């Protein structure tokens, strides 16, 4: 209908304003075009997807627990985590972890991961098995320190591994008093 | 007069349609910051690992980890907090019904107020998404504005504004959004919506002033700059609608030349010149637009707008040439479009492959620009997101299928090591003489019993006993000596003294010896008990280990079955989603095809009109 009017106006040599107005209507009609799919089809597809997601989440949970119990039994398990606070005095690039002199983990952080750490997330850096007894954990942190200079610092902890899983946190704190970052290793009960 | 009225009527109609383009859609930030106050920082590492995935928008990973940690009993410090995070994750992952159930569970009085507030807010969001606006507003009324509600003020305000706008209560939306109480980062989004609400409620001046503030400035994130562009575009719409093309142009000039709204701005910028009759200047933005890919509907409109301007500039030859060019371009676009549609119908081209960069779209077979509207649409977006989720789930199951095989190997290896070590350990244990130890313990116990009855000689040392036996022997020999033996008395005296000494020693040391014996007996009992415990623990460990191996084997087998059952279902779901996306894309392409056909018709009519006018002009000249 709009097209007919446009054609009529054009062929009859009507005023510029009319042409402009018609032109706008058609232009915007084209821009506003959208697809319609019967919602019921999508609804059933969505419900099916939700059911699948639900089942696979449950399956993943069970597999996660199975994997941990099988590969890292509680009496030998050791897990090491990395956390930071706001990170104004130190911008983390990577962490290297050694246990008894052997490098067991080396992680280079992406900006997305750094953001997650700064907002309160904690990174599970390593999970493995250790015999009972004393073990030396050493962590080397690299990144940018105060004034954007390259910064590399280490920290260590002797863990007395008994029965039961051990959880160790490598924590980077901003020491406002010293205006330096602090690197702490501590065990979680 | 009639022509002027027609102009006004059509312009009003046109600009009302434009208003629908920019001002009908409220704006929400793409990130989560506007919607969600962040969960409190973790008090323990396991909850922190969930947040680590949550903040990276890895919803599936975070849900799985949270549920696993809860199963392993590691989230006791964050039970309610974890529940509200789980609900939010489920909502982000498209599990709306599950999320709603989670939030409803948190609405009881024993849940801390802050968490309850967040649950109410999430619930209101779900209802808003479902179009249950009255329910959503009623739900929002439950959010307590106390100390705990402070973190959620902005979120609540924004949601209330959106709900009211959806209900066409623009005055109510203005009341909700005015006096922003949320954080500064979210303010521009609230202000944009407030400006829309002001305009839609009749306060055009107020809305334009706010859009003007939003549209100024030259720095910020990409998201913020896009918001500025949108604010300027929206203001231009309003100004065009109210016959203020010069002011509209000022706003359009602020829109970035290479931002997401630049094509729209260039097209409208030409229109503002056109509206004041300056066709020559209108050609500037439109010519810029024509240098961009012709698949974009805005560029296609410029193809028609340029000859229109030349026509108005009384350059019919140029107008005709431009129209011929437009017809040629539009025909080519339509041909390409139809070729793409045909390829899609035959299954040679998949929209999913093109969107994910997997299909060869080397010759721009599929005009992606024409799908922009489709991609932005909620339905397509949801279907495409589900499609991507299902693909990720398929990869996830493939990973676990491999991993479960390695679990088998691992279990087998553990079993083999155990089977090798157990007999050796058992042999070592059996080498220990349990029976001798028990006999010795029984003998000691008997001696101890006698000693407790007062028999000090039971605890005498062997030396004392030997001396005592010798003294008894001497006594017998003395008894055999004749009474007249000269040393008999002396010998008997010495014997008595020596016997007294031995007896004195035995009796005076009795108490400490009894105590010592008690300790020895206890130690022996402990050693025997340890030995027995060791054997029992070895028996138990053996039983447990084999039970553990059997348990693991069963669990692995069970999970393997679950994976095998789910894999074909995922494959079918993936196909269904692909088909649905293909259908939706084809629908849009069909509409695009129809739009191109209309543009072609317009171009041909316009060209015919120019030729007709040109044909008549000489005749008129000749008639004169």
Image: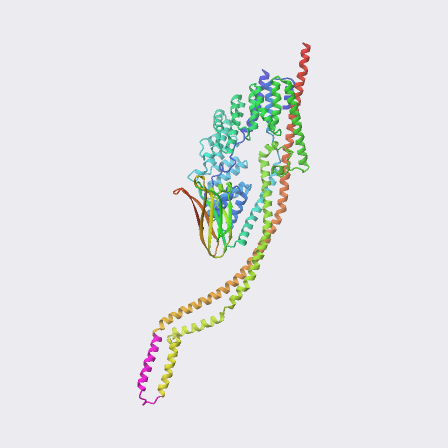
Residue A147 against residue B246 in the figure, above or below: below
Overall secondary structure of the magenta section: helix
Report if residue A3 is visible in the image.
yes
Indicate left or right for B564 with B176 as reference: right
The answer, for residue B74, to whether it is visible in the render is no
Magenta run includes residue B504: yes
Decide which of B121, B52 is in the foreground and name it: B52
Viewer-proximal residue, B76 or B245?
B245
Q: Position of residue B150 (x, y in %)?
A: 43, 38
Answer left or right for A7 relative to B252.
Answer: right
Where in the figure is residue B72, as x and y percent of width and height? 51, 51
Q: Residue at x 61, y 23 (%)?
A: B305
In this picture, which residue range is highlighted in magenta? B481-507
Position of B596 relative to B437 (above/below):
above
Above or below, B454 relative to B317: below
Is B285 placed above or below A99 here?
above
Which residue is at the front of the view, A57 or A112? A112
Question: Looking at this rendering, what residue extends furthest in the front direction?
Answer: A150
Q: Where residue B194 appears, x then y in whole percent?
A: 48, 30
The answer to whether A7 appears left or right of B61 in the picture is right
| Magenta span contains residue B52 | no
Residue in front for this viewpoint, A18 or B352: B352
Residue visible at 51% across and 68% down in the picture: B431
Colour mapping used in the image: rainbow
Q: Does residue B462 appear left or right of residue B554 in this picture? A: left
The quarter of the picture where residue B409 lies is bottom right
């Amino acid at each position: 209908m709009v097209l007919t009017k446009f054609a009529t106006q054009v062929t009859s040599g009507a005023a510029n304003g009319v042409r402009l107005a018609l032109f706008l209507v058609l232009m915007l009609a084209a821009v506003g075009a959208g697809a319609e799919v019967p919602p019921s089809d999508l609804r059933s597809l969505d419900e099916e997807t939700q059911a699948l997601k639900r089942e696979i989440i449950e399956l993943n949970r069970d597999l996660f627990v199975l994997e941990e119990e099988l590969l890292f039994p509680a009496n030998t398990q050791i897990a090491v985590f990395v956390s930071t606070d706001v990170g104004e005095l130190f911008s983390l690039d990577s962490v290297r972890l050694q246990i008894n002199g052997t490098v067991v983990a080396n992680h280079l952080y992406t900006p997305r991961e750094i953001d997650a750490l700064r907002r309160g997330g904690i990174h599970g850096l390593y999970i493995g098995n250790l015999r009972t007894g004393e073990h030396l954990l050493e962590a080397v942190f690299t990144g940018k320190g105060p004034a954007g200079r390259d910064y590399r610092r280490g920290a260590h902890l002797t863990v007395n591994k008994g029965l039961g899983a051990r959880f160790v946190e490598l924590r980077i704190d901003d020491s406002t008093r010293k205006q330096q970052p602090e690197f702490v290793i501590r065990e979680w009960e | 007069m009639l022509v002027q009225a027609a102009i006004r009527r059509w312009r009003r109609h046109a600009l009302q349609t434009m208003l629908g383009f920019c001002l009908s859609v409220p704006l929400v930030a793409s990130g989560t910051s506007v919607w969600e106050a962040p969960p409190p920082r973790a008090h323990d590492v396991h909850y922190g690992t969930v947040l680590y995935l949550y903040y990276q928008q890895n919803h599936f990973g975070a849900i799985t980890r949270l549920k696993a940690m809860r199963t392993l009993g590691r989230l006791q410090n964050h039970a309610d907090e974890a529940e509200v995070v789980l609900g939010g994750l489920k909502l982000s992952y498209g599990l709306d019904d599950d999320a709603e159930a989670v939030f409803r569970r948190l609405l009881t009085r024993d849940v801390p107020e802050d968490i309850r507030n967040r649950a109410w807010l999430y619930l209101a969001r779900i209802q808003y998404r479902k179009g249950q606006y009255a329910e959503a507003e009623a739900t929002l009324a439950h959010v307590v504005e106390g100390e705990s509600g402070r973190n959620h003020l902005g979120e609540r305000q924004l949601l209330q504004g959106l709900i009211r706008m959806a209900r066409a209560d623009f005055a109510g939306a203005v009341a909700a959004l005015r006096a922003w109480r949320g954080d500064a980062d979210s303010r521009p989004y609230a202000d944009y919506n407030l400006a829309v609400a002001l305009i839609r409620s009749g306060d055009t001046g107020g809305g334009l002033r706010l859009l003007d503030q939003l549209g100024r400035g030259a720095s910020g994130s990409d998201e913020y700059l896009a918001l500025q562009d949108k604010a300027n575009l929206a203001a231009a719409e309003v100004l065009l609608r109210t016959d203020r093309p010069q002011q509209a142009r000022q706003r359009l000039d602020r829109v970035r030349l290479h931002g997401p709204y630049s094509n729209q701005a260039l097209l409208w910028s030409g229109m503002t010149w056109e509206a004041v009759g300056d066709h020559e200047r209108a050609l500037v933005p439109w010519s810029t637009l024509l240098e961009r890919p012709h698949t974009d509907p805005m560029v296609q409109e410029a193809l028609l707008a340029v000859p229109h301007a030349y026509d108005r500039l009384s350059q019919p030859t140029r107008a005709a040439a431009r129209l011929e060019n437009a017809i040629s371009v539009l025909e080519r676009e339509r041909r390409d479009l139809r070729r793409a549609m045909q390829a899609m119908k035959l299954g040679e081209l998949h929209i999913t492959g093109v969107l994910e960069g997997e299909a060869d779209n080397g010759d721009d077979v599929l005009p992606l620009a024409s799908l922009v509207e489709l991609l932005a649409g909620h339905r397509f977006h949801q279907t495409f997101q589900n499609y991507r989720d299902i693909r990720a789930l398929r990869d996830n199951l493939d990973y676990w299928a491999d991993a479960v095989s390695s679990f088998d190997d691992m279990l087998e290896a553990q079993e083999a090591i155990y089977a090798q070590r157990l007999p050796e350990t058992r042999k070592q244990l059996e080498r220990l003489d349990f029976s001798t130890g028990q006999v010795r313990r029984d003998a000691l116990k008997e001696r101890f019993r006698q000693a407790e009855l007062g028999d000090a000689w039971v605890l005498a040392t062997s030396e004392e006993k030997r001396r005592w036996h010798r003294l008894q022997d001497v006594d017998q020999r003395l008894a055999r000596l004749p009474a007249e033996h000269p040393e008999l008395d002396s010998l008997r005296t010495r014997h008595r003294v020596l016997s007294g000494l031995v007896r004195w020693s035995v009796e005076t040391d009795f108490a400490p010896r009894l105590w010592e014996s008690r300790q020895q007996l206890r130690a022996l009992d402990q050693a025997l008990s340890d030995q027995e415990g060791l054997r029992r623990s070895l028996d138990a460990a053996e039983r447990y280990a084999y039970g553990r191996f059997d348990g693991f084997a069963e669990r692995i087998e069970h999970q393997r079955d679950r994976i095998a059952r789910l894999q074909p279902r995922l494959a079918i779901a993936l196909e269904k989603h692909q088909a649905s996306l293909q259908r939706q894309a084809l629908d849009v392409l069909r509409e695009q095809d129809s739009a191109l056909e209309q543009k072609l018709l317009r171009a041909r009519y316009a060209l015919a009109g120019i030729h007709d006018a040109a044909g008549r002009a000489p005749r008129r000249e000749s008639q004169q």
